[in-house]
Image (cartoon, rainbow, N blue to C red):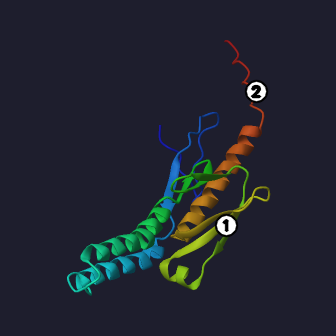
Amino acid sequence: MTQPISYGGRPLTPAPGAPTPELRVARFRGHARRLVWSALVLIAVAGACGYFYGNLPSPAEDWMLFAAAGVVVLLLVVLPFLTWFAHIYTITTRRVVERSGILAARRRELAHVRGYTIQVRRGILQRMWGAGTLTLTNGVDAPLRLVDVPSVDLVQEALIDQVEVNQILAHRDAQPPLPPPPPAPVR
């Protein structure tokens, strides 16, 4: 038996009564362009350490240079990277999940089946990089903001498709089951 095909770009839905497992559609982080300043600081610190190593005035020693460089790199390079790396958005076939936090994790979810509006905001720099901010609002919960999403148009289309499929499945599952067909006459 072959898989059903869809016409007009409509997402496929499972057969009635078939289980619908939760699958991951996409997982992404905010756009990495916010780490440009951290990369520039890392390059500047490495250049400064190379230049001043052995050329410091007499009361200062080389270990002080490396200690100061380590503190600067920790505060301005490592912590921003860890903050960016720990903030993850996941889109599944049932919900949108936002997880963030380095030491204490924070998690927010928004179900597709409830339906929501999608607002896209793109600043000038976001347009240049193909990114944007998505705001998902269902009218009941606080809006879920997906900040600096790379390929924002593709993510928006995926969200629209997931909402459509979940609404179709919820409507179909809310209908009473069809009665069994009458038995065939015996000849």
- The residue lying at 57 percent from left, 60 percent from top is 158
As rendered, which of 98 and 36 lies closer to the eye? 36
- The residue lying at 49 percent from left, 43 percent from top is 3
Residue 19 location (% of width, % of height): 59, 35
Which type of secondary structure does the marked residue at label 2 adopt? loop
As rendered, which of 168 and 28 lies closer to the eye? 28
Circle 2 Cα neighbour tier, 10 Å, few/some/many (<14 / 14–19 / ≥20): few
Circle 1 Cα neighbour tier, 10 Å, few/some/many (<14 / 14–19 / ≥20): some
The answer to whether 21 appears left or right of 2 in the picture is right
- Nearest to the eye among marks 1 and 2: give it: 1
Which circle's residue, 1 or 2, is located before the other in the chain?
A: 1
Q: How far apart are the alpha carbons under marks 1 and 2?
A: 43 Å
**Amino acid type at image mark 2:** Pro
Quadrant hosting residue 145: bottom right
- The residue lying at 29 percent from left, 78 percent from top is 46
Residue identifier under label 1: 135
Residue 8 seen by the camera: no
**Amino acid type at image mark 1:** Thr
The answer to whether 85 appears left or right of 60 in the picture is right
- The residue lying at 74 percent from left, 44 percent from top is 171
As rendered, which of 171 and 94 lies closer to the eye? 94
Residue identifier under label 2: 179
- Is residue 50 positioned above or below 12 on the image? below
- Is residue 75 positioned above or below 86 on the image? below
Residue 55 location (% of width, % of height): 22, 86
Residue sitting at the far front: 59
Which labelled disc corresponds to residue 150? none
- Is residue 172 positioned above or below 84 on the image? above
Which type of secondary structure does the marked residue at label 1 adopt? strand
Residue 139 seen by the camera: yes
- Is residue 158 positioned above or below 72 on the image? above
Q: How many circles with numbers are drawn on the protein?
A: 2
